[in-house]
Amino acid sequence: MHNLDACLISLLRFVRFASVSAQPQAAKASAQCADWLARHLKRMGMCRVGVTPTKGNPIVTAERIENTGLPTVLIYGHYDVQPPDPLNEWISPPFRPVIRGEHLYGRGASDDKGQLFCHVCAVEMLLSKAAGLPVNVKFLVEGEEEIGSPNLGDFLTQTKEKLSSDVTVVSDNFILGPEQPAITYALRGSLDVQLQVTGQRNDLHSGNFGGTVYNPLRGLCHILSGLQGDGGRISIPGFYDRVEDISEKEREYMRSRGPSDRAMLAQAGARTGSGETGFSLYESTTIRPSVTITGISGGYQGPGPKGVIPARARAKLNFRLVPKQDPAEIDGLFRAYVSSVTPPSLRARVITQKQTRPAITDLNHPAILAAFSAYKGAFGRAPIFLRSGGTIPIVDLLQRSLGMATVLMGFALPDNALHAPNERMHIPTFFKGISTSAHFLSEVGRTVTAHNRSNVAEFISKTQRATAGVLA
């Protein structure tokens, strides 16, 4: 238990850094966080530990090559976190982590510092044993995932040979519960844009000009209100051209294994859902695309009234995209839609802020079988297979840049309040995550090596049995 206690203390220290990548004023804290992590990796026995500057936050790398004949696992994570706002809703300060009951509270406790640290602690514990690591291990930890990893692509291109591995493991996603692990096999892509609508040169007196000029706020609402029609379908022409139908076999698996509408509404704290007609809420957030208005502003926001027609209005939107949809193509379709519906007396401008492609995992890869066995060994229960509505930029980047298979092994729980006030990590699940990671590395050492050197068909067959019902 002593080692687990030490891991928890280190995680508390890790969470203290206010490494908010969306806020330029947090650059110093982000750099300090990267340096702390690098020192920790070096102390526990990792080699070639480096902190590489980028145009934004630095990237931390490390490796431990035990034997060139062993398979190599690349462990990815990110040390940057979401902004903690609204601060008044936190029970305790977001960057002064505390333990209450079975949870560690603090921004980044689950996303992604806690999940990443499951692997850090597993490697540290294995290194402390006489047998050492059962595989070669590399770490890749960035500080800009929450803003779309803008500098990671160039880094991957420049360090392709250095990062070359047999498989990458990413832990930045959910399992269904503390007793029910899950392997995520599909992620939606993401497109973030800002829409700005302008009208007259200056703000105007609403008494003198109300009813004579077109209010930019009204124009913005007109554009946004037409984005979705009846049944929740997005109204942009061509938007669904590349959306593929999912097999009934997979949909049945999702219905039998995935969260129910009731469970998802309970997690959201909502009374009713608004998913696309003909699809469950789980399907609406995984196999169907979506658009969300994430922010809107314009006009007077202070206390009391002010009779004004604002000169401009803004909205932020987030599109989530399914496999085969290209965020660049959707960006163009959205721009064409905005141009076609903007009132003639107003001007609209679209600013693209972030693009990430969707990703899907090859369930035939033997590392999936290793993950399946690892979860079963640590949790005492076989994992189920889940699609995720979220986005992790590294997965598509690794597939396209390095041709590398990725296994998504989450340790966050649905009620961990990721991206929200009072984010937390369930400590018993954190400990199980450490055990799962250690099992996974051992299983990769056995399974992937055998896959490379003996009967490929045997391992494909075992994997397909483990993923029965998902594979079409």
Image: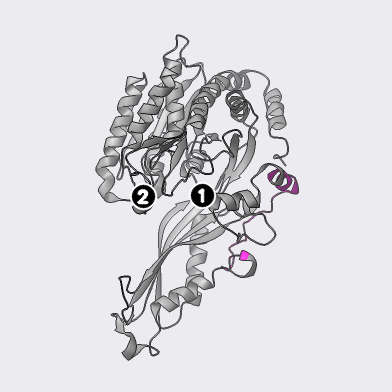
Q: Main secondary structure of the magenta part?
A: loop
The spot of residue 324 in percent (x, y) is: 59, 51
* In front of the other: 81 or 53: 81
Quarter of the figure with the C terminus: top right
108 vs 235, left or right, is: left
User: Which residue is the extreme one toward the top?
Assistant: 130
The spot of residue 309 in percent (x, y) is: 34, 81
The spot of residue 260 in percent (x, y) is: 66, 49
Q: Is residue 422 visible?
A: yes
Residue 253 magenta? yes
Quarter of the figure with the N terminus: top left
Q: Earlier in the sequence, mark 1 or mark 2?
A: 2
* Residue assigned mark 1: 357
Q: Is residue 111 visible?
A: no
Q: Which colour scheme is used?
A: one colour
Badge 1 density bin: few <14, some 14–19, many ≥20, Cα 10 Å: many
Of labels 1 and 2, the one closer to you: 2
Residue lying at 44% horizontally and 77% vertically, measured from the top left: 219
* In front of the other: 267 or 176: 267
Q: Is mark 1 on a helix, strand or loop?
A: loop
CB-based contact (under 8 Å), mark 1 and mark 2? no
Q: Quadrant of residue 408?
A: top right
* Residue assigned mark 2: 83
Q: Is residue 302 shown above or below 210? A: above
Badge 2 density bin: few <14, some 14–19, many ≥20, Cα 10 Å: many
The boundaries of the magenta stretch are 232-254
